[in-house]
Structures are given as C-alpha cells and as structure tokens.
Image (cartoon, grey):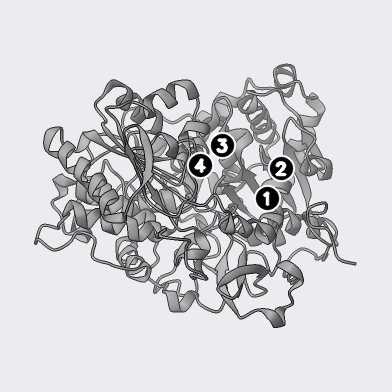
C-alpha cells in the first residue's frame, strides 16, 4: 500500500544496527498520474528546500518539471525524500512568479527591461560610492543561494566595492552555530557527519525538532531505533515533539534556561569523573576554569530554575557520561533563546571533555536552519571573509588579496563585519543609502517589524530586491530583479555535514527571470569593478567558472574544495569537504586524533583560545 507522505512524513521503516550501512529506499513522486516511462529526462540535483541536502533527480517532460525521485547512491539520503522534496518543486510553476524586472515610477512598481533596471541599480551604487564611499553600500542576503552566487557576491562586496556591511538572514539562526564553533574550535566547520547516526549509541538532540525540520535525517534515526541495539536519545525541547516521544530522556525546560541545564549536565559528568582526562590534557585548554564554573550548578539548582526533575538531569548525565559514541545536534531551540552561543558551546564541551570527536558515531552538528547557510559562511556572504579567513589576521587579508589580485587595503578588515541589525540601524540613521536584498524577506522575518518596514520604505534608501516572488520587501523596493529558482540554474551547495552537491539546470526560468549568478555578474560589470591589473574583478561568466574560482580561494583553508569538480560531482554521491590531494574522496569527519584548526596563524577566529583580551571560561581546542 502506498504511504501517504503528508500524514506519514518519514515513510516506512528499514531497520538496521550499529555499524551497518543505512539500507536504500528510493522515494519518488510524479504528477498527473505519470510513470517513469513518460519522463523525457532526469536531471541530477539535490533538495534546496530544507537544510538536509537530500540527493534527488528531477523529472522533466515537455520542458516542465513533473516530479522527483531520490538518488539511491547519495550518502545523505540513500534514496529517501521528505515531503518538501517530494512536493515543494510545484511552487516553481506558480502564476505569482516574478517574470520581468520592476522599477519604481511615480511611487508605483512598473515592468521594465533588464538594461533599464540594472542601469538604475549600478548607477545609484556608483553615485553613492563617489559621494560617500563604500560605507553607504550594504548587502543583505540569504541561506538559499548556490555557492557560486555567494562567492561572487562576497567578491563584489568585499573585493570590489570594499564595504563591510554584508550579512544574511542566517543571522537569525546559524550565526549562533558559527559563533559556537569558532568559540570552541577557533574555526567554523561542522565536526560530525550524518553517518555518525549509523554508529552512535547515544544521540543528543538539543532544541532541535528534527522530525519536522529534517525529516529524512529523522528517518535515519527512526530506522536505527527500529533495529538491533538502538541508540538512546536525549531530547531538550519544551514541546512534546515526535523526537521527545521517541526519547529515552526528554527535558522540557522553561524557555531561556538552556545554559543552566547544560551547566548542570556538565556538573554531573565532571563530578562523576565521566571525562577523558588524557584527551583533555592533550588537546584542550580551559578545562580547570570550566570545572570551577559549573561546580555550583547542581541538579537541584537546575531543577528549580529549569522546572525539570533533578533525577532526570542525573539520568541524562549518566547516559551522556557513559556513551561510547555520542552524536550531539543543535538547532533553533538553542539558537533563538537566551544566551544562545553559550548554550551551544556547552554542547560542544560535553563531546570535548568526553573525547568523543573525530571517530565513527562521535560528532557535533551545529545545524543550519536553511539549506545553503553553510555556503553563506564559507564564501563570505554573511560578512565573514571567504574560506574561513580571519579578518583580524593581516596575513589572511594579504592572501585573499593575492587570490583576488587586489590591494589588501581595499578589503575591509578594520573591524568585525557589520551584523544585520546594525546595518538596518545605519540605514535608519542615513549612513547606509543602498541596500541590496537577495532571496529573503526582512519586512516579515526580522524583529521590530514596524521599525524595519519604516527603514526599508525610506525615500533616501535605494532598495534593490532580487527574488522569485513579489514579497513584502520587494513591494517596498526601488528596483525588483526577477530571479531563477534552484531547478532553473546550475550550481553547488553544501549541507550541514559538509557534503557538496551539484544541482544541474533542469528547465528554463519563467519569462525574463535570470539566475542570481547572472544578475550579480551583470551588476559587477556595470559597476566597472577591476582588479589591480585592470582586468574584470569577476573573471567568470558561468557557474562552473565561479566554482573553479572558489576552489582556488579555498586552497589550503579548512574548507578546501580543490579536489572537487563538476565532473567529479556528476553521476554519484555528494562529497564532503575538505577534499584535496590529501583527501581526494572527501573527509567524513574532521578533528580526528585531536587535530584541530586552532593554530593562531591559521584559525578563523582567535576566539576563546588565543584572545589576549580575556581568559576563556570554556574549554577550547588548542592545536
């Protein structure tokens, strides 16, 4: 009997045991009663509708998308698809899609041609650069573009215009993930792998309703739970979610008390000696300070503050403290709560003091809320510098300038990147006069909406919106640029466990819509951005060229892509970075044998490990 994948989003069970490979189950959906024999062609892709990155093939008939099927060979999903994968592509055919550029005339948005729209955008940008300089220009982007588009945007903003005002809506979610990883490991990059589910004997899920946010990943856990020797599950969530119902221990703490709960768990783990002292001494700093800090956080104190039973804290600590293979995952319940980064760092610390990193079943996944948020951070589209370079390390600036062939002083590195809310504050005050918004809707998603909408509606702010629908933000814009969506363009993107997928163009975008990459390249050329030899700053004209440019930028950095290519990504599975001469088939998990990226000359952030301004209260990696 066919399973209703809306009522049963995880599909049927394929049980398996620890150390075994997750069995294959190929899910598919074709519209209008079609069969696979009716399909004209299948086009390789992966889902960009949620952050799991499930490999899929797109069914095309008469140059229209008519369905999808899972890719059995893909390491992420082994053929499975979630409800968004199966049905979300139908939005491509929406009659509400933007199909022509719009420009504001006499207070109204009217249709125009691309030359008129792009001349208006580039012309206003050049005027402001001459009048006020780079600080008048800002970019607010998304977690839903391709790697090639993020890198091109980062190059334009940092290497061409020279603005520090670049951030994304990932500020609302995965900024915490990045901050926590930098604080603990001095570098972004997820330590774990989805395959850790296959071996873990304990899976701890913190503020993460995986059953609904990443249905295929939860399917993997359900199949482990249905098999022999299932893992124990710890769940921290105030709600009784499907994850909570399946958990061995479910904490439902008062909102805002996550740090107290984590401190109590660490208190118990350390107090009972459930730590790997040899690993701590060899690979971390700050443990003595951590031990001192959590000493006062007894289960009884946490029980009173968090409104959870003290015995439950002890039981969960015992499970975490006795785990041989521990996988920890974190998402919005921690990221969008009080002391978000501190809570996420304490999750890192449990794995660190237990020495459970870099081995099968042992990992940390500070999850993304959006599908390509990992690329936003890698490529410099969230304000950070590309390839996890350190903005406060002059040698990193010089190296990036070499890659881009620009003067190092043209790359802004005089202060930390401007975060989103500060950008809107500058726009409110009038120093930012140009804002380029890509594939996001701040008029709906940001806090203080009345204020944000008033800022976006200012006459003195030139607002550009690049999107596939006429969103609330686009309705306030001076120019609206119609973009292609994921099945209508080619590019790569990277999921939470560093798996890089190639998504090939399946159909043409509607009307005059263009890919985000084509629009950004056009923008760069109209601005006349050059390198120091007078050649075009953006040297590629298509997605594969942009990917090759990114590879060179990533060379020798933690997120090294130099061993990847479009040809290598075609036909098979996604591949995890770092992928280079040393790791030609990719790297399943990082930080094996206590080898970290925390050396001061290499790390992305001095953070707690090396900061001369303060001492850490948390253990961090030291080499």
Residue carrying label 2: 320
Crowding at dot 2, Cα within 10 Å, few <14 / some 14-19 / many 20+, comes out as many
Distance between the Cα atoms at labels 4 and 2?
25 Å
Q: Residue furthest left?
A: 533
- In terms of secondary structure, where does tag 1 sit? strand
Distance between the Cα atoms at labels 3 and 2?
16 Å
In the visual, does 111 lie left or right of 72? left
* Residue mark closest to the camera, 1 vs 4: 4
Residue at the spot x=76%, y=39% of the render? 318
Image spot of residue 507 (x, y percent): 51, 69
- In terms of secondary structure, where does tag 4 sit? helix
Earlier sequence position, callout 2 versus callout 1: 2
Q: Do tag 1 and tag 4 residues touch (Cβ < 8 Å)?
A: no
Distance between the Cα atoms at labels 4 and 3?
11 Å
Crowding at dot 1, Cα within 10 Å, few <14 / some 14-19 / many 20+, comes out as many
Crowding at dot 4, Cα within 10 Å, few <14 / some 14-19 / many 20+, comes out as many
Q: Do tag 4 and tag 2 residues touch (Cβ < 8 Å)?
A: no
* Looking at the image, residue 5 lies above or below residue 58: above
Distance between the Cα atoms at labels 1 and 4?
22 Å
Earlier sequence position, callout 1 versus callout 4: 4
Residue carrying label 1: 326
Q: Do tag 2 and tag 1 residues touch (Cβ < 8 Å)?
A: yes
Residue carrying label 3: 344
Residue at the spot x=44%, y=42% of the render? 182
Residue 499 in view in this figure = no
In the visual, does 230 lie left or right of 522? right
Question: Which label number is shown at residue 174?
Answer: 4
């Amino acid at each position: 009997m066919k399973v209703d994948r809306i009522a049963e989003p995880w599909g049927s069970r394929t049980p398996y045991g620890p150390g075994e490979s997750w069995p294959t189950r190929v899910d598919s959906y074709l519209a209008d009663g079609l069969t696979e024999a009716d399909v004209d062609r299948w086009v390789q892709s992966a889902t960009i509708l949620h952050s799991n990155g499930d490999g899929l093939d797109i069914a095309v008939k008469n140059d229209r998308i008519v369905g999808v099927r899972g890719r059995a060979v893909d390491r992420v999903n082994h053929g499975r698809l979630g409800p968004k994968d199966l049905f979300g592509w139908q939005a491509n055919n929406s009659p509400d899609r933007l199909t022509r550029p719009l420009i504001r005339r006499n207070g109204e948005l009217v249709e125009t041609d691309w030359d008129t729209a792009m001349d208006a955008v580039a012309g206003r940008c050049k005027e402001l650069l001459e009048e006020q300089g780079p600080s008048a220009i800002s970019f607010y982007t998304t977690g839903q573009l391709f790697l090639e588009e993020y890198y091109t945007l980062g190059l334009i903003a940092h290497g061409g215009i020279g603005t520090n005002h670049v951030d994304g809506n990932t500020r609302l979610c995965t900024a915490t993930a990045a901050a926590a990883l930098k604080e603990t490991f001095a570098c972004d990059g997820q330590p774990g792998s989805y395959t850790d589910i296959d071996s873990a004997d304990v899976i701890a899920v913190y503020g993460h309703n995986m059953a609904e946010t990443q249905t295929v990943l939860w399917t993997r856990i359900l199949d482990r739970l249905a098999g022999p020797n299932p893992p124990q599950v710890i769940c921290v969530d105030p709600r009784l979610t499907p994850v909570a119902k399946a958990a061995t221990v479910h904490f439902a703490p008062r909102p805002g008390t996550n740090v107290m709960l984590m401190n109590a768990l660490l208190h118990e783990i350390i107090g009972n000696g459930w730590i790997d002292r040899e690993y701590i001494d060899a690979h971390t700093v700050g443990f003595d300070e951590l031990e001192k800090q959590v000493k006062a956080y007894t289960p009884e104190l946490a029980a009173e503050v968090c409104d959870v039973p003290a015995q439950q804290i002890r039981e969960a600590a015992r499970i975490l403290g006795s785990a041989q293979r521990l996988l920890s995952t974190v998402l919005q319940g921690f990221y969008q709560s009080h002391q978000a980064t501190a809570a996420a760092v304490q999750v890192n610390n449990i794995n660190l003091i237990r020495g459970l990193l870099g081995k099968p079943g042992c990992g940390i996944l500070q999850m993304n809320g959006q599908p390509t948020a990992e690329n936003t951070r890698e490529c410099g589209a969230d304000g950070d510098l590309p390839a996890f370079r350190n903005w406060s390390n002059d040698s990193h600036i010089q190296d990036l300038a070499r890659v881009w062939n620009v003067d190092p002083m043209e790359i802004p590195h005089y202060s930390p990147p401007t975060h989103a809310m500060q950008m809107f504050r500058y726009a409110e005050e009038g120093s930012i006069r140009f804002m380029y918004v890509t594939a996001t809707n701040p008029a709906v998603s940001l806090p203080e909406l009345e204020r944000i909408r008033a800022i976006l509606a200012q006459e003195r702010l030139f607002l550009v919106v690049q999107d596939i629908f006429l969103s609330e933000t686009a309705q306030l814009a001076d120019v609206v640029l119609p973009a292609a969506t994921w099945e209508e363009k080619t590019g790569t993107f990277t999921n939470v466990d560093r798996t890089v997928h190639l998504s090939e163009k399946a159909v043409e975008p509607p009307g005059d819509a263009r890919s985000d990459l084509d629009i950004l390249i056009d923008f760069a050329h109209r601005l006349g951005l050059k390198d120091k030899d007078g050649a075009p700053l953006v040297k590629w004209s298509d997605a594969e060229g942009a990917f090759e440019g990114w590879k060179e930028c990533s060379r020798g950095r933690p997120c090294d892509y130099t061993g990847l290519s479009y040809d290598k990504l075609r036909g098979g599975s996604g591949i995890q970075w770092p992928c280079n001469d040393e790791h030609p088939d990719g790297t399943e998990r990082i930080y094996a044998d206590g080898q970290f990226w925390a050396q001061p000359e290499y790390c992305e952030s001095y953070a707690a490990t090396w900061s001369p301004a303060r001492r850490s209260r948390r253990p961090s990696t030291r080499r």
